[in-house]
Image: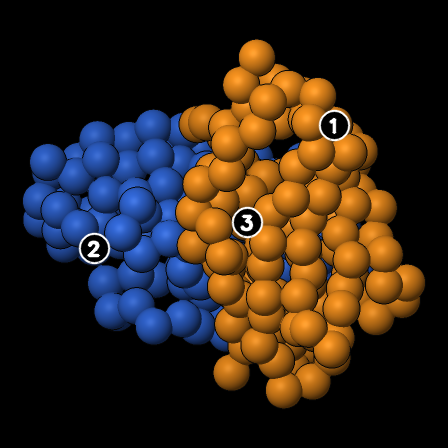
Chain colours: A orange, B blue
Amino acid sequence: AQSVTQLDSHVSVSEGTPVLLRCNYSSSYSPSLFWYVQHPNKGLQLLLKYTSAATLVKGINGFEAEFKKSETSFHLTKPSAHMSDAAEYFCVVSEWSSNTGKLIFGQGTTLQVKP
Amino acid sequence: KAGVTQTPRYLIKTRGQQVTLSCSPISGHRSVSWYQQTPGQGLQFLFEYFSETQRNKGNFPGRFSGRQFSNSRSEMNVSTLELGDSALYLCASRGSGESDQETQYFGPGTRLLVL
C-alpha cells in the first residue's frame, strides 16, 4: 500500500527566508506524487506534481520539489517565503490501478510565515 | 474553464437527519471523487464515480453513498447523521487524458456541522 509521511507538523519561517517542507513516501512502484496547499477555509489547490518525468518539478508561486528515489523523499522548497504562503501543505501520493484511483494524503504541515 | 463547484458551502444538521451535498466537476471531466477532512483523521477518500458508475470506494460505513448523473455532476448523501460526521467534504474531478488522469482538482468544499 502507498503512504506518505510529512516529517513536520508545523514549520515557522521568517518572510524572505527559504522554505523546506519534508515528505517521505512509501510505494511498491514508481509513484505519482503531488503537493497541495490549503489556505484557511478554502479547498485544496494543486501546487505541483511528479509523474516520472523530470525529478525536479516546478510548481506555482515559486515552489518546487525534487523526487529522490534513493531517499524515498519528495521535499517541497521555496527560496524566499512570502506572507501569503502561510497555509497548510499536503504531500500526496496517488494509488492508481485499472483506470481508477484515489489520493492518499499526508497529515499536513502548517507553514507559519513571520514578518 | 470554471473550476469544481460545490453546494452548499455550509450546512448545519442535527443527529439522525440526512444530508445531500452536490458537486459539479470541471467541464469535460467525467470522474468525480469525494473526500472527508477532519482534524483527527485528516483527509480520507470516500468514493469515486466515473460515467455514472462507482469505480472505487473508501472505508466508510454504508450511511455514506453517492451517485453521478449523465452530465457528470455528483451528489453525496449521508444518512442518519452522527456527531462525528462533522467535517469538510471535498469534491475533486480529474480528466481522462493520459498525462493528467491521476491529477485531481478540488472544489472549495462543503462544511457540515452536526449538532
Q: Which residue is mark 2?
A: B79
Q: Amino acid at mark 2?
A: Ser
Q: Which mark is residue A80?
A: 1
Q: Residue furthest top?
A: A115
Q: Residue at x 9, y 49 (%)?
A: B16
Mark 3–mark 2 distance (CA, rounded to whole Å): 30 Å
Q: Amino acid at mark 1?
A: Ser
Mark 1–mark 3 distance (CA, rounded to whole Å): 19 Å
Mark earlier in primary sequence (1, 3) = 1
Q: Which residue is mark 3?
A: A90
Query: Callout 1 environment at 10 Å: few (<14), some (14 to 19), or many (20+)?
Result: some
Are the residues under marks 3 and 2 on the same chain? no
Q: Residue furthest right?
A: A54
Between disc 1 and disc 2, the foreground one is: 1
From this view, report whether residue A91 is shown above or below residue A113. below
Residue B94, percent from left and from top: 69, 56
Q: Amino acid at mark 3?
A: Phe
Quadrant including the C terminus of chain B: top left
Chain letter of the residue carrying label 2: B
Left/right of residue A54 with respect to residue B113 in the rendered view: right
Q: Residue at x 83, y 53 (%)?
A: A57
